[in-house]
């Protein structure tokens, strides 16, 4: 299992196989948080884990449990908004809508600039 913490103090537990990748974990978290997995950074200590890393590579010897920090980065959203792929742009808009506080003028200005 993976115990995931956020900067806001929220803690979640995800049941994933030890042989699963960090990308698999990011996909599970993204589904629960309704965002694209590329927005997530999974961190242990000061190390940002690669998508291809396996959960078991970071577990302490003799355990299958892992504690990580998850942060949201909007870099992938901004890249996808500039994409020519309409599906990627739509997914990015959905992610922004989920993450942005209601009534945020900055979000509206950014979306307008990216789509204009």
Image (spheres, helix red, strand yellow):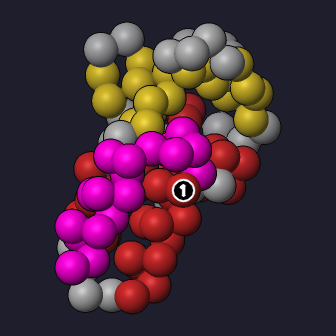
Magenta highlight on residue 108: yes
Q: Secondary structure at mark 1?
A: helix
Q: In this figure, which residue is indicated by the disc labeled 1? A: 97
- Quadrant location of residue 89? bottom left
Residue that appears at 21% across and 67% down? 113
- Please indicate, yes or no, whether residue 82 appears anywhere in the rendered image: yes
Q: Tell me the crowding category of disc 1: few under 14, some 14 to 19, or many 20 or more residues within 10 angstroms, Cα based.
A: some
Image height of 97 relative to 19, above or below: below
Circle count: 1
Residue 7 location (% of width, % of height): 50, 16
Image height of 5 relative to 27, above or below: above
As drawn, is 33 to the left or to the right of 90?
right
- Please indicate, yes or no, whether residue 19 appears anywhere in the rendered image: no
Residue 78 location (% of width, % of height): 27, 59
Residue that appears at 33% across and 46% down? 106
As drawn, is 49 to the left or to the right of 40?
left
Q: Is the C terminus in the top left, top right, bottom left or bottom right quadrant?
A: bottom left
As drawn, is 20 to the left or to the right of 107?
right
Residue 5 location (% of width, % of height): 60, 19
User: Camera-side residue: 109 or 18?
Assistant: 109
Identify the magenta region.
98-116
Residue that appears at 57% across and 44% down? 102
Image height of 31 relative to 55, above or below: below
Magenta highlight on residue 107: yes
Q: Is the N terminus in the top left, top right, bottom left or bottom right quadrant?
A: top right
User: Camera-side residue: 109 or 16?
Assistant: 109
Residue that appears at 54% across and 56% down? 97
């Amino acid at each position: 299992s993976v115990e995931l913490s956020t900067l806001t103090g929220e803690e979640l537990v995800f049941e994933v196989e030890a042989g699963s990748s960090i990308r698999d974990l990011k996909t599970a978290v993204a589904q629960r948080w309704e965002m694209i997995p590329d927005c997530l950074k999974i961190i242990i200590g000061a190390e940002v884990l690669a998508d291809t890393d396996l959960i078991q590579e970071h577990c302490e010897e003799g355990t299958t449990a892992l504690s990580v920090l998850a942060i949201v980065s909007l870099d992938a959203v901004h890249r996808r908004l500039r994409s020519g792929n309409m599906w990627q742009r739509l997914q990015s808009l959905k992610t922004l809508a989920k993450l942005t506080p209601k009534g945020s003028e900055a979000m509206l200005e950014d979306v307008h600039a990216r789509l204009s």
